[in-house]
Amino acid sequence: MFLVTAGLIIVRKIEFVRALPAFGIITALLAGVPLTGGSENIADFVIVGGVINLAEPMFIYVLSMMFADFLLKYGIKDELDYLCRYYLAEKPQCAVWLITVLTVLFSAVIMHIGALMLSAILFLPLLLKAGFNKQTAVSLLLLATGLGSCLNPGYHLLYAGLLSLDPASVKEFYHIMAFLCIIAVVVYLSLNSGRVNPVFRQKTAKRRLNYKLLCMVVMPVVFVLALKINIECSLILTLSYGFLAIGAKKPFMNLLFSLQEAIAKSVDVIVLLSAVGIFMHAVKTQAVVDLMAPLLLSLMPKTATECLLFFTILTPLVLYKGPFNMQGMGAGLSSVIMASTTLNPMVLGMALLSLNTLRKIMDPIEVQNIAVMQYAQVDNNLVIKKVLPYAMAINYFALFYALVITA
């Protein structure tokens, strides 16, 4: 049923905003989850809890839209464009490489949706002006964000806790994956370097810059690093500074009006994330996990080579919140998978970490991917096709390292 639903979504026979919650609720009902009553039920845990669980990404998206609107309305995006064209006109490829490095740094500091949205807001217009189409530009941001996430200490601790693994070993494996991601990004940029628009090469005349507003570009990351606050507070502080810097007479009211406009622009994403949240909570219920566990136990291989083939062939099960997805069904099944063979648990843990890095890069219903594709107004299937060979190559070599070399 899971594979059928995912297939129908991919070929666009059904919209996943309708299919995901329906499939999740039906699966939970078939597994024996009650409509009401008990700690895990359809009404409270699946529907209400699922939507509330993704309230933070929804709020980050709204704040990101506020930030994007401010940058556009007060000309900060034009200032960034000018900087690139003035200083890097003779070496346009350097601008693309610089954008890639900054995206990696953002995602190495900021976890989840915040890093990718910030990169998309700041750099997507520059990549489009440089000659990339939307699919190529978004694919580059996804690969760079995947690389940065491998270097983010927050993910090391998060997955070490979820999988009950040694944090130092998790960090070491993530650094191996980061090396593979670097190779993928370099190959991707090398193959797409010929896309730079000749217009971008024309050096623009020198002009004065508004440094008071231009510093807003780096403020969110600086606040996260210096004040150790989350991206939501960082964006609110940055926007507050922005309204004060432009001399707004009623900065608080301006902030509220901006919030109102951003919410109106974010309705589609909020609905999509609500659907994903309902599905996530449905497949994480203990009844669904207990239903899936015997099937997984019967399929799990016993040797490293068999595991390599098993996880390679069944890689799609990490997508659409499937059994290997640590933010979906895999959140409950990970302990079953880890205990299902005689192999070292760290080896299986590495396999799950590898698959979940692939998930961040190319899962169509990953929260950050939904947000950035809606923001860029790009077909998610086209982006997935573009990034697929790179993500699969990263995943295969990481699996090979985990299951063959370290086994």
Image: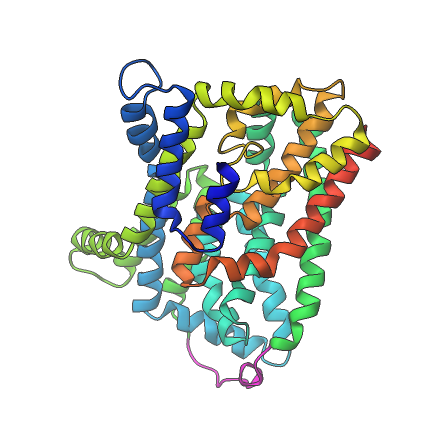
Above or below: residue 241 compared with residue 91? above
**Does any portion of residue 151 appear in the rendered image?**
no
Residue at the far right: name it. 405
Expressed as whole percent of the image width and height from the top left, the position of residue 254 reads: 19, 56
Residue in the image at 64% along x and 41% along y: 315
The image quarter containing residue 173 is top right
Residue in the image at 49% along x and 42% along y: 4
Q: Nearer the viewer, residue 385 or 158?
A: 385
132 in magenta: no
Q: Nearer the viewer, residue 356 or 339?
A: 339
Magenta stretch, residue numbers: 196-208
Q: Nearer the viewer, residue 67 or 285?
A: 285
User: Overall secondary structure of the magenta stretch?
Assistant: loop
**Does any portion of residue 251 appear in the rendered image?**
yes
Q: So how many labels did they put on this image?
A: 0
Apparent side of residue 381 relative to residue 296 in the rendered image (left or right):
left
Apparent side of residue 6 relative to residue 371 in the rendered image (left or right):
right
Q: Considering the image in quadrants, where does the C terminus appear? A: top right
Q: Nearer the viewer, residue 133 or 4?
A: 4
201 in magenta: yes
Expressed as whole percent of the image width and height from the top left, the position of residue 400 reads: 78, 39
Expressed as whole percent of the image width and height from the top left, the position of residue 373 reads: 44, 57
Apparent side of residue 186 relative to residue 197 in the rendered image (left or right):
right
The image quarter containing residue 100 is bottom right
